[in-house]
């Protein structure tokens, strides 16, 4: 029997074949998708970090000549912000390139490795498991381009030079001892500071090093930005030899390591090389403790500080209001800032400096100044040259201001009358307490400098019987917006400081509204007092009290002159205080920061503790406390 294939049959077969091909293609695509690494669903949450099981080449390889390393883990891993968290010591000039593939991670060195150098690659924060993002804690790979593994160790902490709080965003860097200055060359070793401020530099040469710590804003290992912070030691530090551990557990799954030509066998699941040099059954805390106790590892303490800018720069110049010009400098100007008005002719200003001295305010004294749309000024000051020597400097300044349309009437001179903006007054509080204490000067501050003061419109009135107390009204040199009220304050009394309307006027002829400030004094028995006997203290020094154990902001202080061994702080509000002693080397009555270029450390600060280790000074009302402070026994 003969079969004939019609045209319709041929078309049907082609269609069926097409369907088959499409089905095969879909199966292939699905199989590829199924081959992707996916996180398994269900089951308990994985909280175990990925564990390094082997490496190629082996850990502690010597005479390394390659450019690639592969690490193998017990689960699928990936990188997390690798370039930010990976630590390589000595640091590389060009980045280490990672490639993760399943349970392995390849590392490629794009930099030329130094000869006869031990490298330490810490991946603890840069590698996570794929399922839960657990970090591969204590994951470190060590190798050497020479014939031995260096075993030097430097440990310590970085703290703020003034508060002694730990600094956790710094990098500690080692430099060969014969280097002319730290941070001029690339570091011989580096390590990131931990959250508690501590650091460990391991596998460095057993040599003497200069040590510096840096908050490196631009990540170039150099101190070259004004915003960066620095710490350094005056003397070199000798890297001590790391302890050598002998495996006592063994185990068939042990990993063979080569350490400085000595072959050791580390066994068990915990025996893979870890960041603390951990071996089987011994945790990092144990190793740190044993090393400190048995090997006497030196603890390096670095005091971190921010420098006062050595290059004086005018950061900002502006005219925020018609009657005020503001100049902000990077540091307090050397010498007095003098302003000469070029135009308009006849404009006059009065000068005010901020407490730190880095901001200068110029207040207009006449209508010619504040009515001008544009001011042309010559600002004469001093700036430091390249040798940090102050030199005369002249800035030509042009500042405009667009006058706002005011609804009030204008006087003939174009000055707003008292129907315009009112001059606001406030009381300055030096402490957290609102009460006036014996010997205090009450300070009243205005928004603008005082042009005129009518003493007759100030009254200090008793709240009990409306009688008036006598007082003295004082003005402060260089503080044109402040007025002081001094008197023999009556104890345990309530009274009101009344400032009648029009008592003060600004140069813009703005006057104050009638204002009343309620005031209060207490009996001396409401307060406490501290009397200090000082032993071995710096000469001179500063005693500072603070109440916040974390922020450590000064609330009261007393400057102890040369030769004095007694000091007191009176009229303290009852509460808990802490004490620090500042070595006021330059005698300026304040803590002075360091200068790296001049190799000048910050002024030393020590914090008071009792022989029992207690730092709190608890005070009660109507109590006086005698406290002995032996500076030599305070923690440095």
Image (tube, grey):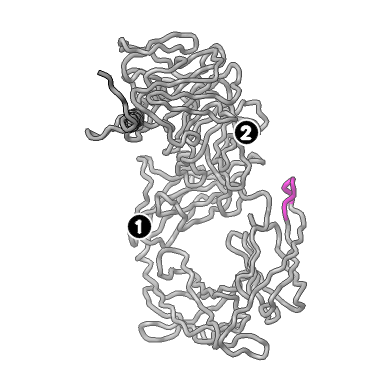
Q: Position of residue 450 (x, y in %)?
A: 60, 78
Residue 575: mark in rendering? 1
Query: Visible in this render: residue 25?
Result: yes
Q: Which residues are magenta?
A: 383-389
Q: Which residue is mark 2?
A: 182
- The single residue placed furthest to the front in the displayed view is 1
Q: On screen, 66 above or below 520?
A: above
Q: In the rendered view, does 492 fall on the left or right side of 344?
A: left
Q: Quadrant of residue 72?
A: top left
Residue 75: mark in rendering? none
Query: Foreground residue, 43 or 619?
Result: 43
Mark 2 element type = loop
Q: Position of residue 487 (x, y in %)?
A: 49, 76
Q: Residue at x 62, y 59 (%)?
A: 358
Query: Could you tell me what secondary structure mostly forms the magenta stretch?
Result: loop
Q: In the rendered view, does 84 fall on the left or right side of 509?
A: left
N-term-proximal mark, 1 vs 2: 2
Query: Foreground residue, 143 or 435?
Result: 143
Mark 1 element type = strand
Q: Residue at x 48, y 54 (%)?
A: 567
């Amino acid at each position: 029997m003969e079969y004939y294939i019609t045209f319709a049959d041929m078309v049907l077969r082609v269609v069926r074949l097409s369907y088959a091909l499409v089905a095969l293609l879909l199966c292939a695509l699905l199989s590829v998708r199924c081959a992707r690494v996916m996180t398994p669903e269900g089951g308990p949450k994985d909280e175990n970090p990925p564990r390094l099981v082997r490496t190629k080449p082996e850990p502690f390889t010597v005479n390394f000549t390659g450019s690639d390393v592969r690490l193998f883990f017990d689960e699928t891993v990936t990188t997390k912000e690798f370039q930010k968290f990976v630590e390589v010591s000595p640091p590389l000039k060009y980045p280490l390139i990672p490639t993760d593939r399943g349970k392995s991670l390849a590392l490629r060195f794009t930099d030329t490795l130094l000869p006869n150098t031990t490298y330490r690659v810490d991946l603890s924060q840069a590698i996570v498991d794929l399922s839960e993002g657990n970090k591969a804690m204590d994951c470190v790979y060590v190798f050497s381009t020479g014939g031995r593994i260096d075993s030097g160790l430097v440990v310590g902490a970085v703290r703020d030079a003034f508060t002694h709080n730990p600094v956790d965003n710094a990098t500690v860097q080692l430099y060969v001892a014969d280097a002319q200055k730290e941070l001029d060359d690339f570091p011989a070793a580096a390590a990131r500071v931990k959250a508690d401020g501590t650091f460990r530099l391991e596998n460095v040469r057993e040599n003497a090093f200069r040590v510096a710590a840096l908050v490196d804003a631009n990540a170039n290992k150099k101190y070259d930005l004004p915003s960066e912070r620095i710490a350094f030691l005056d003397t070199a530090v000798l890297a001590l030899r790391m302890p050598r551990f002998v495996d006592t557990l063994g185990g068939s799954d042990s990993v063979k390591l080569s350490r400085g030509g000595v072959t050791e066998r580390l066994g068990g699941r915990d025996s893979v090389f870890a960041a603390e040099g951990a071996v089987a059954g011994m945790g990092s805390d144990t190793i740190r403790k044993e090393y400190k106790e048995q090997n006497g590892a030196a603890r390096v303490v670095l005091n971190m500080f921010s420098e006062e800018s050595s290059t004086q720069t005018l950061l900002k110049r502006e005219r925020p209001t018609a009657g005020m010009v503001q100049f902000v400098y990077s540091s307090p100007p050397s010498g007095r800032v003098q302003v000469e008005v070029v135009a308009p002719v006849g404009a006059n200003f009065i000068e005010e400096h901020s407490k730190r001295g880095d901001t200068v305010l110029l207040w207009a004294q006449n209508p010619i100044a504040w009515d001008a749309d544009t001011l042309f000024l010559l600002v004469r000051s001093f700036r430091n040259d390249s040798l940090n020597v102050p030199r005369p400097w002249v800035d030509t300044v042009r500042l405009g201001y667009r006058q706002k349309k005011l609804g009030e009437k204008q006087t003939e001179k174009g000055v707003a009358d008292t129907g315009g903006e009112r001059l606001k007054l406030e009381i300055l509080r030096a402490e957290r307490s609102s009460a006036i204490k014996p010997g205090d000067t009450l300070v009243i501050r205005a928004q603008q400098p005082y042009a005129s003061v009518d003493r007759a419109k100030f009254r200090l009135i008793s709240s009990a019987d409306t009688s008036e107390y006598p007082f003295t009204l004082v003005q402060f040199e260089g503080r044109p917006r402040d007025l002081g009220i001094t008197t023999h304050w009556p104890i345990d009394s309530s009274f009101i400081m009344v400032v009648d309307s029009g008592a003060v006027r600004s140069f813009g002829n703005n006057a104050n509204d009638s204002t009343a400030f309620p005031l209060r004094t207490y009996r001396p028995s409401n307060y406490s007092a501290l009397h200090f006997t000082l032993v071995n203290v710096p000469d001179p020094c500063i005693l500072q009290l603070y109440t916040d154990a974390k922020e450590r902001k000064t609330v009261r202080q007393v400057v102890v002159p040369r030769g004095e061994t007694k000091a007191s702080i009176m009229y303290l509000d009852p509460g808990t205080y802490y004490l620090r002693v500042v070595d006021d080397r330059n005698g300026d009555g304040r803590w002075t920061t360091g200068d790296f270029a001049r190799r000048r450390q910050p002024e030393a600060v020590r914090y008071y503790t009792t022989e029992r280790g207690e730092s709190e000074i608890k005070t009660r009302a109507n109590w006086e406390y005698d406290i002995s402070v032996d500076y030599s026994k305070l923690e440095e």
